[in-house]
Image (cartoon, helix red, strand yellow):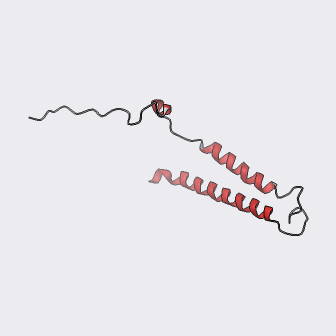
């Protein structure tokens, strides 16, 4: 006859020696700090367009490769941050 006792599973599937934070249950991130640092980086990239080089914004009259890189990186960061905001906003719906 089969036993009516339930078999107990190990309480932790991950060994705390491998990941010490498992012991107290924290695997999170810093969403506010990530957003703040990200938007600061976007601002820093765009403010570098005005500097000691002769780009289109600084009065050089022509578009330089470094201007293009700064704009592309800032736009990429901004898109990533907006996607992250949208993902966090709708995460509870899954």
Image position of 14 with respect to 85: above or below? above
- Answer with the quarter of the image where residue 51 lies: bottom right
Outermost residue on the left side: it is: 1
Does residue 5 appear to the left or right of 70 in the view shown?
left
- Answer with the quarter of the image where residue 67 lies: bottom right
Q: Position of residue 74 (x, y in %)?
A: 72, 58
Residue 31 or 75: which is nearer the viewer? Answer: 75
Q: Position of residue 44 (x, y in %)?
A: 77, 51
Residue 63 or 92: which is nearer the viewer? Answer: 63
Q: Residue placed at 50% from the left, 35% from the top? A: 26
Q: Residue placed at 75% from the left, 61% from the top? A: 69
Does residue 25 appear to the left or right of 6 in the view shown?
right
Q: How many marks?
A: 0
Image position of 50 with respect to 40: above or below? below
Does residue 74 appear to the left or right of 29 in the view shown?
right
Q: Residue placed at 68% from the left, 49% from the top? A: 38
Q: Residue placed at 50% from the left, 32% from the top? A: 21
Q: Position of residue 28 (x, y in %)?
A: 53, 40
- Answer with the quarter of the image where residue 8 lies: top left
Outermost residue on the bottom side: it is: 62
Q: Position of residue 1 (x, y in %)?
A: 8, 34
């Amino acid at each position: 006859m089969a036993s009516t006792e339930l078999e107990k599973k190990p309480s932790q599937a991950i060994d705390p020696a491998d990941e010490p934070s498992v012991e107290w249950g924290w695997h999170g991130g810093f969403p506010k700090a990530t957003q703040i640092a990200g938007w600061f980086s976007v601002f820093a990239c765009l403010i570098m367009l005005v500097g000691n080089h002769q780009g289109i914004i600084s009065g050089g009259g022509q578009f330089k490769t470094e201007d293009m890189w700064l704009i592309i990186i800032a736009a990429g960061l901004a898109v990533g941050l907006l996607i992250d905001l949208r993902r966090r906003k709708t995460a509870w719906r899954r």
